[in-house]
Amino acid sequence: MEQTTSGPDGPSLLRNVISASGAFEGSEDIAVARDLARGFLTDVQAVHGLPVSGRVLGTVQLVVSELVTNARKYAPGPCLLTLEVDGGAIEVSVWDGNPTPPAILGPDPTRIGQHGLELVMAVSQSFTVCREPVGKRITATIVLADDPGGDVVGRQP
């Protein structure tokens, strides 16, 4: 767990971030990335006492799988997966060495394949693509707890 505080110029702010990360190179590592996410969220619930629904566990594994698959498919070299829980949500972030943003296609039921980012965006509260000095970072945020009314918490249409 990481704790950060603000400097002397601002009010002291203590922030608890629970995180895990891993580097992945081969397509066989996609399953390892999903396992990392599952183990991380299991610990978030068991060790830190934060609620993680079964839906969220499956959703995060789907997002990890799609983002790591895209990084392995379209970028040379390794990709880095970072999982961070802060403020009741998990950020799934994947960095890769290709600076070109992904093509995000609109829904098309007749298209075969290339629906991964469409799915990620549909199940995430937020989705961002940021260029970095080397490569890019794609981040999807997923709320940890389901809505008390049973509604799925994600992006609003």
Image (cartoon, helix red, strand yellow):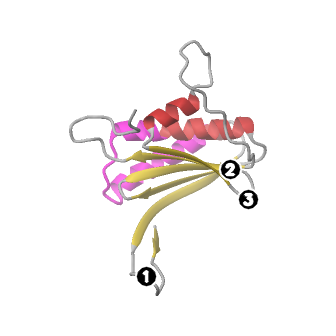
In the current view of this chain or complex, which residue is farthest to the bottom?
A: 8
Separation of residues labelled 2 and 3 (CA atoms): 8 Å
Q: Is the residue marked by circle 2 packed among few (<14), some (14-19), or many (20+) residues within 10 Å?
A: many
- Residue at the image point whose x is 40% and y is 49% from the top: 42
Disc assigned to residue 10: 1
- Residue at the image point whose x is 66% and y is 37% from the top: 102
Is residue 119 rendered to the left or right of residue 51?
right
Mark 2 residue type: Lys
Question: Can you tell which of label 1 and label 3 is closer to the viewer?
Answer: 1
Separation of residues labelled 2 and 1 (CA atoms): 31 Å
Disc assigned to residue 136: 2
Is residue 22 rendered to the left or right of residue 150?
right
Is residue 56 rendered to the left or right of residue 105?
left
Q: Considering depth in this image, is 49 or 69 the residue closer to the camera? A: 69
Quarter of the figure with the C terminus: top left
Question: What residue span does the magenta drawing correspond to?
Answer: 31-60
In the current view of this chain or complex, which residue is farthest to the top?
A: 110
Q: At which x and y percent is residue 4?
A: 47, 74
- Residue at the image point whose x is 32% and y is 35% from the top: 152
Classify 62 as above or below 10: above
Q: Mark 3 points at which residue?
A: 133
Mark 1 residue type: Gly
| Magenta stretch contains residue 135 | no
Q: Is the magenta stretch mostly helix, strand or loop?
A: helix
Q: Is the residue marked by circle 1 packed among few (<14), some (14-19), or many (20+) residues within 10 Å?
A: few
SS state under label 3: loop
| Magenta stretch contains residue 44 | yes
- Residue at the image point whose x is 42% and y is 49% from the top: 41
